[in-house]
């Protein structure tokens, strides 16, 4: 665990430095409120681990890892506005704390800092831009053409959650100088982990105890979000099985990458297993 904590700490230190340098101070404060309020840091961890798994050094991937976390947080600001959710990670959401206008500017600021970090590498820029197209199309679909069956739900989960996970892993492989087939294999791994993560998230929201989960439950129903439980005929157990299938395919993609067995690969395998059984 110390191995992973050191790498997440690298991301946190760089994230703090990037936000501290933002001008004016008021915008820096708003970005800090969003991005430094906690969070699992799963996506940036995937970036670092993918880089090391491909033979690269963690330091080479830190800026890309911070960038993907900034993009993720920018999307959460907009999600909270759409959902009128006034709490995020146990603190007031950006719009609840600062108002709608400043929150939207904060989201823009997070994206701007992300692309500044990515601008040193054209391939990295393309990867994240493509993931944002997918994310935007997913958000639009959710608003105007809600999924009504399992196939449509899975496509929405791929766009809204899987696409940025894919970008996170591909960025790590790119930072390591990996070839196109390896970049693709790590991207497929992470996309499937992201979909499994989203399915399990939906199940926990519908079935878990709020105290054990560490956050309110029943939010998908309250916010009228199209969770796997809401829009398919799957039982929670069947939905968990779908998550397991995605996890198994993620592990298959890692095997197809044919990289050397290292601690980083072990942690990526553990992540694919963990997202299916996590309880919070």
Image: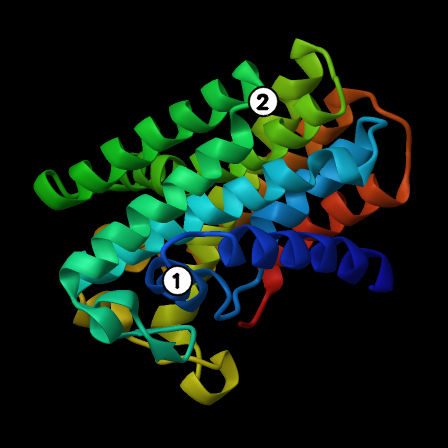
The residue that label 1 is drawn on is: 25
Residue 183 or 108: which is nearer the viewer? 108
Residue 3 or 202: which is nearer the viewer? 3
Mark 1 or mark 2, earlier in chain: 1
Residue in the picture at 46% in, 43% down: 195
Q: Is residue 178 found left or right of 194 in the rendered image?
A: right
Category of crowding for the residue at label 2, using alpha-carbon neighbours closer than 10 angstroms: few (below 14), some (14–19), many (at least 20): few
Q: Position of residue 252 (x, y in %)?
A: 69, 30
- Checking the image for residue 120, the label placed there is 2
Label 2: state its secondary structure.
Answer: loop
Q: Nearer the viewer, mark 1 or mark 2?
A: 1
209 vs 186: above or below:
below
Residue in the picture at 52% in, 39% down: 165
Residue in the picture at 39% in, 47% down: 110
Residue 150: which quarter of the image? top left
Q: Would residue 269 be visible to someone looking at this image?
A: yes
238 vs 252: above or below:
below
Residue 162 or 112: which is nearer the viewer? 112
Category of crowding for the residue at label 1, using alpha-carbon neighbours closer than 10 angstroms: few (below 14), some (14–19), many (at least 20): few
Q: Position of residue 240 (x, y in %)?
A: 49, 56
**Mark 1 to mark 2: distance in Å?**
26 Å
Residue in the picture at 75% in, 21% down: 257
């Amino acid at each position: 665990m110390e191995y992973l904590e050191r790498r997440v700490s690298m991301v946190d230190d760089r994230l703090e430095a990037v936000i501290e340098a933002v001008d004016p101070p008021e915008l820096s404060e708003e970005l800090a409120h969003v991005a430094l309020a906690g969070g699992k840091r799963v996506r940036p961890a995937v970036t670092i681990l993918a880089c090391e798994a491909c033979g690269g050094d963690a330091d080479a991937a830190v800026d890309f890892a911070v960038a993907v976390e900034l993009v993720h947080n920018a999307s959460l600001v907009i999600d909270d506005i759409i959902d009128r959710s006034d709490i995020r990670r146990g603190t007031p959401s950006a719009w609840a704390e600062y108002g709608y206008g400043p929150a939207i500017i904060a989201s823009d600021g997070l994206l701007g800092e992300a692309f500044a970090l990515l601008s040193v590498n054209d391939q990295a820029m393309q990867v994240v831009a493509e993931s944002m197209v997918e994310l935007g199309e997913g958000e639009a679909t959710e608003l105007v053409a809600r999924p009504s069956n399992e196939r449509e739900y899975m496509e929405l989960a791929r766009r809204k959650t899987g696409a940025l996970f894919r970008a996170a892993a591909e960025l790590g492989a790119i930072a390591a100088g990996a070839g196109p087939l390896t970049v693709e294999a790590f991207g497929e791994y992470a996309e499937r982990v992201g979909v499994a993560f989203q399915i399990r998230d939906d199940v926990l929201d519908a079935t878990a105890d709020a105290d054990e989960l560490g956050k309110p439950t029943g939010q998908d129903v309250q916010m009228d979000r199209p969770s796997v439980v809401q829009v398919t005929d799957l039982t929670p157990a069947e939905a968990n099985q779908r998550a397991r299938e995605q996890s198994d395919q993620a592990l298959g993609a890692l095997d197809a990458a044919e990289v050397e067995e290292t601690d980083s690969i072990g942690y990526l395998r553990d992540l694919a297993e963990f997202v299916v059984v996590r309880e919070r």
